Amino acid sequence: MARDNRNIGAVRSDSPIRSKGMGASLRRAPWLPLLVVASFPARADLPLTVEELLTAENRWRAEFAAVYANTERQGVSTGEPILVQTGDTQYVSIPTRIGASRINTDTWVLTPGLRYGLSADTEIYGHASWLAQRTRSEDPAGAAGSGSDRFADAWVGVNHRLVRESASPGVIAFADLALAERGSERTSHGKSASFGATVYRVNDPLVLSLTAAWRLNRARQDGAPRRDPGDSVMLNPEASFAANNDLTLSAGLLWQRVGAEAIDGVKQGLAHTRTSLTLGLAWAVSERSTLHFSGRSNASGGDGAELGLTWVVKLGELPKRQRWK
């Protein structure tokens, strides 16, 4: 739940969006992905500019995201996993040690990715994540520390514009599939998928959006036990404000419900919900390059905070509609 992200269709200069009196600042201003922190996809990552919602036809874009998360939990007895958001609808699930009474974890996730425009309405994408984790835990037996550096997951997906924004809001649908996901001991293939859509409305100088997504997680073998991570759903309303030609500010809420994990058919703990506040800033460094700064702070549900930085670069020749005057 990629974005990604965490890009909604090319809006030409004659698009109905301009009839609303949209100024040059909003047409050119960078947008933050409207779903969750970093920018990697599993949803229709909303745009870098209103004129460039999806990757241009027959063009490539490269993305590189880095996320830092700090989480502290107390009274952990069931091994409930830590979720680190790597994109608007995507997260990395990190198992915790069963029986620990206090766990403090630092996690760094790096995610490179590529996008390709199949048409003005459709783009495909892929990305992979690597993580480094440092954990400090304490229980009645004493304190301990551990660390790991490993491959996390790899995804491919598609964004498709269903409705161009005019009299009605614009709609982008997405679907993606996990090619590989690393568990505690083994790597599974094709066991997770995400589906969802983003609805957006431009009202100069604001862009309002709502993203809904469902992540299907099937049971997979992870060493001796068979692990079922549980499905999840999420909602992310967000508002973006074009401060000027180069800067866009955004704020929103992320609500998630994650099903209870099961080991060999036995549920571990409870299904849980969490709500987070998301903030972001996007800076159009040049006509080719955009930086997204993002943050997420947990408001309920017991998790910590995350900081993210995403760099997006257009590759090859720039389409004429993307050249700045």
Image: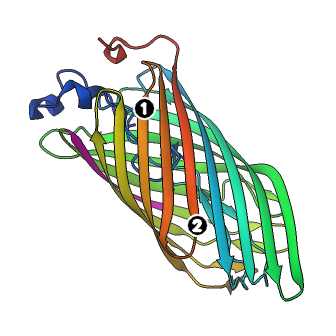
Q: Which mark is residue 32?
A: none
Please give left or right for residue 202 compared with residue 273 in the image: left
Residue 148, above or below 10: below
Q: Residue at x 79, y 59 (%)?
A: 134
In front here: 175 or 147?
147
Residue 290, above or below 58: below
Residue 54, above or below 151: above
In front here: 96 or 193?
96
Please give left or right for residue 9 compared with residue 13 in the image: right
Label 1: which secondary element: strand
Q: Is residue 144 magenta?
A: no
Q: Residue 319 location, x and y as percent?
A: 39, 14
Of the residues under marks 1 and 2, which one precedes in the sequence?
A: 1
Q: What residue is disc 2 on?
A: 304
Q: What residue is disc 1 on?
A: 283
Q: Residue at x 24, y 37 (%)?
A: 164
Label 2: which secondary element: loop
Task: Residue type at mark 2: give it.
Answer: Gly
Circle 1 residues within 10 Å: few <14, some 14–19, many ≥20: many
Q: Which residues are magenta?
A: 205-214
Task: Residue type at mark 1: give it.
Answer: Trp
Spatial distance from mark 1 to mark 2, Cα to Cα? 26 Å
